[in-house]
Amino acid sequence: MTRWNHLLLALVVSAAPIAFAQDQPPQPTTGDPDSASSPHQREATGQTGTAEAPANQSPEASSAATPHQNDTLGEGSSGKKMASMPNATDPQTFVKKAAVGGMTEVEASKLAVSKAQDPQVRAFAQKMVKEHTAANEELKSLAEKKGWTVPSSLDAEHKAALQKLSAKSGAAFDEAYSKQMMQDHEKTVALFTAAEQTSDRDLAAWVQKTLPTIEQHEQLAATLPGASHSASASKKDAQKQY
């Protein structure tokens, strides 16, 4: 082999590794994901390209970040809690509850008129029979004109309460009746207050006219023996109103 042949062979052998290296595809890095240079490479390495929240950012700051998310939490875009709109009381529902409550107070008070030992309790019971009977008749008359159903008798729960009350006597009866009147009138005041927003104008007018009487009953009930003394009226002032 001549000298030129040896030189040509040496050039071919030395150029082969360079050509082989150029034909190989680029190998993905296995180190830091940040070294991936393209979006596809970053996805392959678990790097989405989304900036992480600062370390000092609270969980609250990252939640409900949009106005729509705030609205689902009961908040507007300003971040302040929105006041809920009150729902008007359904007339038929109110009539049912008010009628049953009124009948219960009349029947319990009739028991107190005959069984109570304390003169104040008996006087209160007489007032309840008179004024709740009148209110019940007014509500029944209005309901019939409107075509609403009015209960004609007590349900099982209220009948059981009256039976339990009638089984007592003496001072125990006075205390039980007083407590029941206080609790019943607290519920009745709450019921009537909500019904001021009822959708029927005639019913709302009757509720507004009757509510002050119910509130007075609550104050008087609070002064009875054994009742909760949370009302502002004193026992002496209540006795003057009979």
Image (cartoon, rainbow, N blue to C red):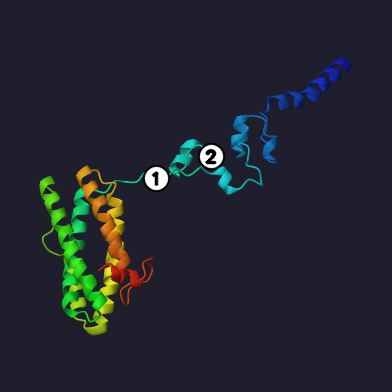
Along the line of sight, which residue is nearer the eye, 94 or 40? 94
Query: Can you tell which quarter of the image residue 168 is in?
Result: bottom left
Residue drawn at the location 31% of the way across and 46% of the way down: 87
Residue type at mark 2: give it: Ala
**Horizontal side, residue 226 vs residue 164: left or right:** right
Residue drawn at the location 21% of the way across and 79% of the way down: 116
Query: Can you tell which quarter of the image residue 14 is in?
Result: top right
Front disc: 2 or 1 = 1
Q: Which residue is mark 2?
A: 65
Q: Which residue is mark 1?
A: 84
Q: Earlier in the sequence, mark 2 or mark 1?
A: 2
Residue drawn at the location 32% of the way across and 77% of the way down: 226
Quadrant where the N terminus sits is: top right
Q: Quick one: label 2, few (<14), some, or many (20+) residues within 10 Å?
A: few
Q: Image height check: is 110 above or below 204?
A: below
Along the line of sight, which residue is nearer the eye, 153 or 201? 201
Q: Residue furthest right?
A: 3
Q: Secondary structure at mark 2?
A: loop
**Horizontal side, residue 6 vs residue 132: left or right:** right
Is residue 221 visible in the rendered image? The answer is no
Along the line of sight, which residue is nearer the eye, 191 or 74? 191
Q: Secondary structure at mark 1?
A: loop
Distance Cα–Cα, label 2 vs label 1: 22 Å
Residue type at mark 1: give it: Ser
Residue drawn at the location 24% of the way across and 43% of the way down: 199
**Horizontal side, residue 87 vs residue 84: left or right:** left
Query: Mark number for residue 61?
Result: none
Q: Image height check: is 80 above or below 19?
A: below
Q: How many marks?
A: 2
Q: Residue furthest bottom?
A: 170
Residue 91: image location, x then y, percent: 21, 48
